Image: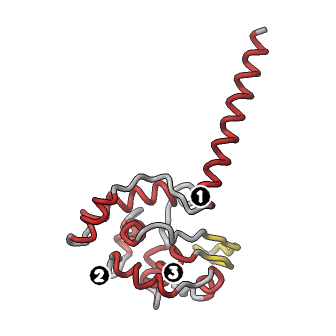
Amino acid sequence: MRHLYANRAAYLLAGLLVVATALFAWLRSEGGTLIAVDEDRVQDIEGEAWDEAAWGPLGEAVYAAECQACHATLTHIPELFAAQDGRSYLIDLMLNGYDGEMVIEGSASSVEHPRFADLDDAELAAVLNHLLVSWGNDEALPDEPDFYAPPDIEEARDRDLDPEEVAASRPSP
């Protein structure tokens, strides 16, 4: 009799996990997000000096919610950032996604990266800056890097590239 209850509990738990996974996938496909961002705080950030104290916590939260499931570390970001047109390429990648071949640290693979145009300008600028300074990346940045700010993202939204165009524009570090 105990096995019957244990099996029912296991099936119930498995069913709940399937439903939760399906809801999460649907939410992501509809452009939803699981992070709670205080919109008033984002407005305050956009109005004040855009430095690490302002964008640091927001960038870390967006990375944890949107990126960390696929990316443990991104230590090649400073090379891309420093390459010719690399700064704008990273914005285009986040806004429009990526679909094509990519070589990272000598390993080639076919990559499909989702678009994150549903994030607001402050969130995207903050997460890009977070990528630039995490995992020791700040040591590989050029002197006095031009960190991202919300107006950089707003301006790039007009480019509206498809993921294949982003792949074709990938700079060689």
Closest to the observer, 11 or 140: 11
Q: What element carries label 2?
A: loop
Q: Say which residue label 2 marks.
A: 143
On screen, residue 130 above or below 148: above
Q: Is mark 3 on a helix, strand or loop?
A: helix
Which amino acid does the dot numbered 2 rest on?
Asp
Q: In this view, does 11 lie to the left or right of 102?
A: right
Q: Say which residue label 3 marks.
A: 92
In the picture as drawn, the residue positioned furthest to the bottom comes out as 84
Label 1 close to label 2 by CB (< 8 Å): no
In the picture as drawn, the residue positioned furthest to the left comes out as 48
Residue 116, position as x, y percentages in the image: 52, 69
Closest to the observer, 150 or 100: 150
Label 1 close to label 3 by CB (< 8 Å): no
Which amino acid does the dot numbered 3 rest on?
Asp
Q: Residue 46's quadrant in the figure?
A: bottom left
Q: Say which residue label 1 marks.
A: 28
Q: How far apart are marks 1 and 2 (CA)?
A: 37 Å
Mark found first going from the N terminus, 2 or 3: 3
Q: Distance between the residues labelled 1 and 3?
A: 20 Å
Query: In percent of the image, x 64 and y 54: which residue is there?
Result: 26
Query: In percent of the image, x 48 and y 86: which residue is there?
Result: 158
Graded by Cα atoms within 10 Å as few (under 14), some (14 to 19) or many (20 or more), the crowding at tag 3 reads many
Q: How far apart are marks 2 and 3 (CA)?
A: 23 Å
Q: Residue 28's quadrant in the figure?
A: bottom right
